[in-house]
Image (cartoon, helix red, strand yellow):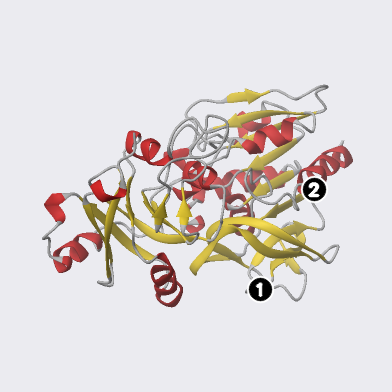
C-alpha cells in the first residue's frame, strides 16, 4: 500500500533557469527530465496521465488535492501513463471512490513515474506563467538529499527541448486495428494515430463509424486502399513544424477531396497543410475549463485543452490558400489563440481542443456530428 507522507524520501524539482523546489517523493523514486507544464483541471487526472500528448512532459497539477478517487481500469486513454513526471501539492492518503481499483501513487510507482509532492504548486505555476514552459528535472531519494542544485540544473539543461521534437511515431500504434461501429455501419474512417486517445474512436463508433486506426507512418496508398468516407488525424505530442511526413500525407488527402477532421495536433497539421505557420505558446493551454467561441454560431463552449503549439492564421478575415478559402472557426476567449479551422471550398475542418475529453465538459461533442454531416454530403 501507499506509504504515509511521513515516510516519503526527499525530492527536488529543479528548473532549467535554476529555480528549486524541495518536497517529498511521490510515485517512483529516482530521476526524470522533461518539459514543465501545468494543467488547470480539477478532476480527470487519470485521463491526463494516460494522454499520449503529454509524452516527455512533467505535469504540474494546479488543483491542490490529487489522488482522492484512485485509479480504475475503465478511464485510461491509452495502455500506459505517458507523462515523464508528476507534480502535486497534497496527495491523497487513500482513495475514496466506488470504481477505484488502486491508489494513484501505487500506479505511478508500478509504471516507474517519478513525481514530487509537498511543494507550493501555486508558486511553481506562477513561475511558469511568467517565464514560460521550460525543461525540468525531478530528483528523489536519499542520494539527492545533499546534491548541488547548480549541478542538477546543468543536467536539466542537457535534456532535449520540445521545439523541433518529432514525437508522434514514439506514441503511435505499431499495427493497424479496427474499432467496430456500434449498430449499423454507416461510414468507414481512416484514423491516423499520432497519439490518439481511446475515447476518440469510441465516440466515432457511436455515430455508426467503423474506425481503422493506422500508424503514424501510414502512406496515402494504404489510406486509399480502405476506400474511406473520411480521414481523421488525432492529437499527439511534439512540434508540428517537424511533422513533414504527416503534412505530406494530409495534403494528399486534401487533394483527393476526402472529408477530413483533425483534433489538436491534427489541427496544427491542417494549418500547415494549408500553408499557415505554427508557433510555440509561452506556457500552453492545459486543463478542462478553457472558454472557446464557435464563430459559426456565436456559442461559447467550455472545453478541454492540451497543447503547447498553435496555428498562426488571421482571425479577422478569410484566407485564400491552395485549397480555396479558409476561415478560423473557433477562437480561445482568454488569449485569441486559433482553436479551429474550416475550409470553405473543400470538406475539411479541425479543432485545437479535445471534444472527446472523457473527464471534461461535453460542450463540443457536436463536432463528431459535423464530421458525419460532412461525409454524408460528400457521398
Q: Residue at x 49, y 51 (%)?
A: 243
Q: Residue at x 87, y 38 (%)?
A: 376
Please give the residue where the numbered disc 2 appears in the rendered image: 366
The C terminus lies in which quarter of the figure? top right
Q: Position of residue 87 (x, y in %)?
A: 38, 55
The N terminus lies in which quarter of the figure? top left
Q: Position of residue 350 (x, y in %)?
A: 70, 53
Crowding around mark 2 (Cα neighbors within 10 Å: few <14, some 14 to 19, many 20+) is few
Q: Position of residue 277 (x, y in %)?
A: 57, 65
Q: Position of residue 264 (x, y in %)?
A: 60, 53
User: Which quarter of the picture shows residue 214?
Assistant: top right
Q: Which mark is residue 336?
A: 1
User: Which quarter of the picture shows residue 107?
Assistant: top left
- Work out whether 306 lies above or below 227: below
Contact between marks 2 and 1 (CB within 8 A): the answer is no
Q: Judge from the rendering whether residue 54 lies leftward or rightward of residue 105; answer left or right.
A: right
- Please report whichever mark, 2 or 1, sits nearer to the chain's N-terminal start: 1
Amino acid at each position: 500500500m501507499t506509504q504515509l507522507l511521513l515516510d516519503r524520501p526527499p525530492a527536488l524539482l529543479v528548473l532549467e533557469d535554476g529555480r528549486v523546489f524541495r518536497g517529498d517523493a511521490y510515485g517512483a523514486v529516482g530521476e526524470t527530465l522533461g518539459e514543465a507544464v501545468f494543467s488547470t483541471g480539477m478532476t480527470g487526472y487519470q485521463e491526463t496521465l494516460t494522454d499520449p500528448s503529454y509524452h516527455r512532459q512533467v505535469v504540474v497539477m494546479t488543483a491542490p488535492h490529487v489522488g482522492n478517487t484512485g485509479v480504475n481500469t475503465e478511464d485510461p486513454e491509452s495502455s500506459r501513463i505517458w507523462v515523464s513526471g508528476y507534480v502535486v501539492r497534497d496527495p491523497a492518503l487513500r482513495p475514496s471512490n466506488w470504481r477505484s481499483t488502486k491508489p494513484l501513487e501505487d500506479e505511478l510507482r508500478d509504471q516507474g513515474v517519478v513525481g514530487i509532492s509537498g511543494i507550493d504548486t501555486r508558486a511553481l505555476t506562477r513561475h511558469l506563467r511568467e517565464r514560460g514552459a521550460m525543461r525540468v528535472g525531478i530528483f528523489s531519494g536519499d542520494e539527492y538529499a545533499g546534491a548541488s542544485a547548480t549541478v542538477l540544473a546543468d543536467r536539466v539543461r542537457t535534456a532535449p527541448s520540445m521545439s523541433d521534437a518529432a514525437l508522434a511515431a514514439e506514441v503511435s500504434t505499431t499495427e493497424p486495428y479496427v474499432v467496430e461501429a456500434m449498430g449499423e455501419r454507416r461510414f468507414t474512417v481512416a484514423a491516423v494515430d499520432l497519439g490518439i486517445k481511446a475515447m476518440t474512436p469510441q465516440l466515432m463508433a457511436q455515430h455508426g463509424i467503423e474506425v481503422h486506426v493506422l500508424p503514424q507512418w501510414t502512406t496515402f496508398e494504404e489510406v486509399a486502399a480502405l476506400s474511406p468516407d473520411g480521414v481523421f488525424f488525432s492529437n499527439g505530442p511534439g512540434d508540428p513544424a517537424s511533422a513533414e511526413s504527416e503534412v505530406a500525407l494530409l495534403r494528399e488527402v486534401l487533394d483527393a477531396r476526402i472529408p477530413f477532421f483533425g483534433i489538436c495536433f491534427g489541427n496544427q497539421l491542417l494549418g500547415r497543410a494549408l500553408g499557415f505557420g505554427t508557433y510555440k505558446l509561452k506556457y500552453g493551454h492545459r486543463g478542462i475549463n478553457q472558454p472557446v467561441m464557435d464563430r459559426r454560431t456565436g456559442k461559447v463552449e467550455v472545453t478541454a485543452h492540451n497543447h503547447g503549439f498553435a496555428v498562426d492564421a488571421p482571425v479577422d478575415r478569410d484566407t485564400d490558400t491552395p485549397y480555396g478559402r479558409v476561415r478560423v472557426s473557433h477562437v480561445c476567449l482568454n488569449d485569441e489563440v486559433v482553436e479551429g479551422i474550416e475550409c470553405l471550398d473543400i470538406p475539411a475542418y479541425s479543432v485545437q481542443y479535445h471534444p472527446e475529453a472523457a473527464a471534461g465538459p461535453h460542450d463540443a461533442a457536436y463536432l463528431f456530428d459535423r464530421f458525419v454531416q460532412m461525409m454524408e454530403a460528400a457521398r
